[in-house]
Each structure stands twice: as C-alpha cells, then as structure tokens.
C-alpha cells in the first residue's frame, strides 16, 4: 500500500505544482512540505541507509542555498525555490545534474514560448481567459515550476527511492 502511494504521490504533486504555477503563478507551500514529509516517511519505511539519507539531505540543502540566492536576486520565485529543494531531496546527488539540465532546457523552451506569446497581439477573446492574460502580461515572470515539475517527473524513475520501491 505504501509503495503504491509513493509511486503516485511524487508524480501527483509534480503535476499539481506545474498546473498550479501555470494557472496561478503560485506553487502552494503545502506541495513542498508534503514532498519533504513523504520523503522522510519513505526513508524510514524502506529503510534507507543513513549514508543515503544524509546524501539526499545534503543535496537538498545545497540546492536550497543555490535557489535561495537566486530568489534573493528575483531570478526565481519562492515557490520555485521550495519545489526545487523538495524535489532534490527525492532525486539526490546521483540525479541532480540530469534534473538541472532537463529543468534548464524545459525552462528555456517555456520562456521562449511565453516570450513569443507576449510579443504577439492576442485577440481580446483569448485574453479574457485569466491564466492566458497572466502569461501574456509582460510584467509577470515565467511559471518555471512547470519546467521543474517536468524534470522531476522525468528523473523520478532513475532515483534511489524508485528503485527501493521496486520500480523498474
């Protein structure tokens, strides 16, 4: 039962974070909190070795330090920073580079798509849809949580957590 839950919780929270950021430009704190709590619950249940647990926690702490600086410079939003930190807790050092590369490429493509949206005059009817109007507004940022979530979803099957759960 717990294994099935773990296979569902991480992907479901990634999908929720992506759509939440896309539609509202916000990622609720509870998403990152649930990810962190669920990781520690799984680490105890599986059980995960102390070395692996410390490795995953140090990975998350380093990512937190990096994204905190990025947040201070307003390069990323607070929800993005928390999501990246919580996700890195799950993926660990072994998959961090792949996660970063995928998130960067997806984020770059997302940014280009939103810039194209903002450079073109959209019909008034389209701009009546609140989330499209928000995306088209040049004063808003990019919902980078979409790229972070996509990267997390793509990397998850390669993680220690997935393999300990019996994933293929």
Image (tube, helix red, strand yellow):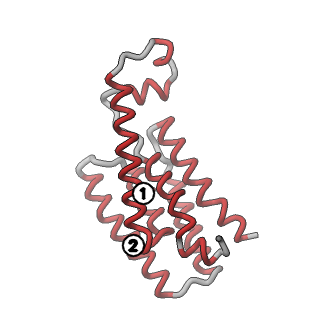
Q: Horizontal and vertical percent for residue 130?
A: 49, 25
Which dot marks residue 59?
2
Query: In the image, what residue occupies the spot 54% across and 42% down?
Result: 19
In the image, is 159 to the left or to the right of 119? Answer: right
Give the farthest residue toward the bottom. 50
Q: Horizontal and vertical percent for residue 64?
A: 35, 64
In the image, is 137 to the left or to the right of 10? Answer: left
Q: Horizontal and vertical percent for residue 100?
A: 37, 60
Q: Is mark 2 on a helix, strand or loop?
A: helix
> Looking at the rendering, in which quadrant would you find the N terminus?
bottom right
Give the quadrant of residue 84. Answer: bottom left
Query: In the image, what residue occupies the spot 60% across and 80% down?
Result: 44
Q: Nearer the viewer, residue 95 or 17?
A: 95
Query: In the image, what residue occupies the spot 25% across and 53% down?
Result: 72
When the figure is inspected, residue 46 is found, relative to residue 69, above or below; the finding is below
Q: Horizontal and vertical percent for residue 81?
A: 38, 55
Give the farthest residue toward the front. 168
When the figure is inspected, residue 1 is found, relative to residue 55, above or below; the finding is above
Q: What element carries label 1?
A: helix
> Looking at the rendering, in which quadrant would you find the C terminus?
bottom right
Give the farthest residue toward the top. 124
In the image, is 26 to the left or to the right of 10? Answer: left
Callout 1–callout 2 Cβ contact below 8 Å: no
**Separation of marks 1 and 2 at Cα, in angstroms:** 13 Å
Tag in front: 1 or 2: 2
Q: Nearer the viewer, residue 30 or 123?
A: 123
Give the residue at mark 1: 82
Query: In the image, what residue occupies the spot 66% across and 59% down?
Result: 8
């Amino acid at each position: 039962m717990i294994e099935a839950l773990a296979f569902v919780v991480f992907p479901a929270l990634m999908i929720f974070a992506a759509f939440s950021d896309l539609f509202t430009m916000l990622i609720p704190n509870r998403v990152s909190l649930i990810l962190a709590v669920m990781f520690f619950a799984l680490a105890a249940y599986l059980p995960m070795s102390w070395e692996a647990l410390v490795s995953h926690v140090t990975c998350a702490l380093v990512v937190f330090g990096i994204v905190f600086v990025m947040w201070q410079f307003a390069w990323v939003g607070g929800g993005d920073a928390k999501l990246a930190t919580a996700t890195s807790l799950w993926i660990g050092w072994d998959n961090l580079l792949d996660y970063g590369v995928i998130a960067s490429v997806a984020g770059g493509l997302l940014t280009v798509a939103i810039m194209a949206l903002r450079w073109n005059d959209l019909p008034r009817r389209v701009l009546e849809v609140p989330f499209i109007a928000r995306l088209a507004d040049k004063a808003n940022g990019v919902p980078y949580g979409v790229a972070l979530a996509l990267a997390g979803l793509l990397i998850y099957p390669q993680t220690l957590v997935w393999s300990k759960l019996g994933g293929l």
